[in-house]
């Protein structure tokens, strides 16, 4: 009986130990929970933008390039004759003069589109290129020794020769209005540089108020930088008279168009502007105008072109 009790106690102890072992295993099987930081929100992907495909017959647009802004001081060089051209912006200017001769009256406001004009008168060197090209006839007359300087203004050309040259060079003769605006700006000044005249600004007759020449001959172009107009045009007072495109009429300003005037539709003489080295100061004013036979050539007749 005693032995049975011992074995019963051992059996109860074993059962107890087994149950304890199972409970411990269950507790250890439960993982320890620790806080895990949440990952930052994902940045949405930036979509790749692609141009829609062109229609099979479409032509791609050319690349757009910046265009320099044109204004006073802008220049370009003619590939044909090497002439520098200055830019004259669109706008109004005062044309004519109430203080001048009858042909200059009335002074009136004129609007012109933008254009380019030769910075100087055409030279012998430039004109020779047109002759060599077969497009121009040689200038008339026997040139004195001074003409050996190739960059002297070309003279002894009539209106038709001047017109032919300008077309060959890719331009045209300026209209009378274009010539005057390029010479005097917009404010009605008397000379290209403003008021007053002396031999540092122009080649004319009447040195220091006396009846004497500043030089007594035509000169190389661009010799008088102090005589430049507001647009940078040179030699527009004195040196040589310049042919322009228009027919001449003394009364043309009465009722003339206020926009881009082209001169009379017909006539017998063509306009000459600017005066020459043989003219007194009164006749080299920017508003002074005169006309002559388009077939005339002379030692004091030259020209410049526009486009």
Image (cartoon, rainbow, N blue to C red):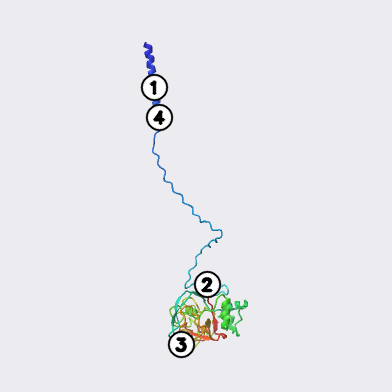
Image location of residue 98, percent across then percent down: 43, 85
Residue 194 visible to an observer of this rendering:
no
Q: CA distance from mark 4 to mark 1?
A: 17 Å
Image location of residue 88, percent across then percent down: 48, 75
Residue for badge 1: 17
Q: CA distance from mark 1 to mark 3?
A: 140 Å
Number of numbered labels in the structure image: 4
Tell which circle, 4 or 2, labels the residue nearer the N-terminal end: 4
Residue farthest toward the top in the current orientation of the protein: 1
Tell which circle, 2 or 1, labels the residue nearer the N-terminal end: 1
Do tag 4 and tag 2 residues touch (Cβ < 8 Å)? no
Residue for badge 2: 76
Instruction: Report the front residue among 294 and 81.
Output: 294
Tell which circle, 4 or 3, labels the residue nearer the N-terminal end: 4
User: Which numbered disc covers residue 102?
Assistant: 3
- Judge the density around disc 2: few (<14), some (14-19), many (≥20) Cα neighbours within 10 Å: some
Tell which circle, 4 or 1, labels the residue nearer the N-terminal end: 1
User: Which numbered disc covers residue 180?
Assistant: none
Tell which circle, 1 or 3, labels the residue nearer the N-terminal end: 1
Residue farthest toward the bottom in the current orientation of the protein: 211
């Amino acid at each position: 009986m005693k032995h049975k009790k011992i074995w019963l106690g051992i059996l109860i102890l074993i059962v107890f130990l087994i149950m304890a072992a199972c409970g411990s295993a269950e507790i250890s099987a439960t993982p320890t929970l620790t806080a895990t930081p949440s990952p930052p929100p994902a940045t949405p992907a930036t979509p790749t933008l692609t141009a829609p495909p062109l229609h099979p017959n479409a032509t791609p647009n050319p690349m757009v390039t910046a265009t320099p802004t044109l204004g006073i001081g802008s220049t370009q060089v003619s590939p044909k004759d090497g002439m520098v051209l200055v830019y004259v912006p669109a706008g109004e200017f005062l044309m004519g003069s109430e203080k001048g001769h009858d042909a200059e009256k009335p002074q009136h406001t004129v609007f012109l589109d933008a254009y380019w004009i030769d910075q100087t008168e055409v030279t012998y060197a430039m004109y020779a290129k047109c002759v060599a090209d077969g497009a121009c006839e040689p200038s008339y007359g026997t040139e004195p020794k001074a003409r050996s300087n190739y960059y002297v203004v070309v003279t002894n050309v009539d209106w038709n020769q001047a017109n032919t040259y300008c077309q060959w060079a890719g331009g045209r003769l300026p209209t009378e209005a274009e010539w005057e605006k390029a010479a005097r700006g917009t404010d009605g000044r008397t000379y290209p540089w403003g008021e007053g005249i002396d031999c540092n600004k122009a080649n004319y007759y009447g040195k220091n108020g006396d009846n004497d020449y500043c030089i007594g001959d035509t000169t190389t172009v661009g010799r008088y930088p102090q005589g430049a107009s507001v647009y940078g045009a040179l030699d527009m007072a004195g040196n040589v008279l310049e042919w322009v495109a228009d027919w001449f009429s003394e009364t043309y300003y009465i009722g003339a168009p206020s926009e881009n005037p082209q001169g009379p539709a017909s006539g017998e003489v063509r306009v000459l502007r600017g005066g020459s080295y043989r003219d007194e100061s009164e006749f080299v004013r920017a508003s002074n105008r005169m006309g002559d036979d388009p077939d005339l050539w002379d030692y004091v007749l030259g020209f410049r072109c526009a486009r």
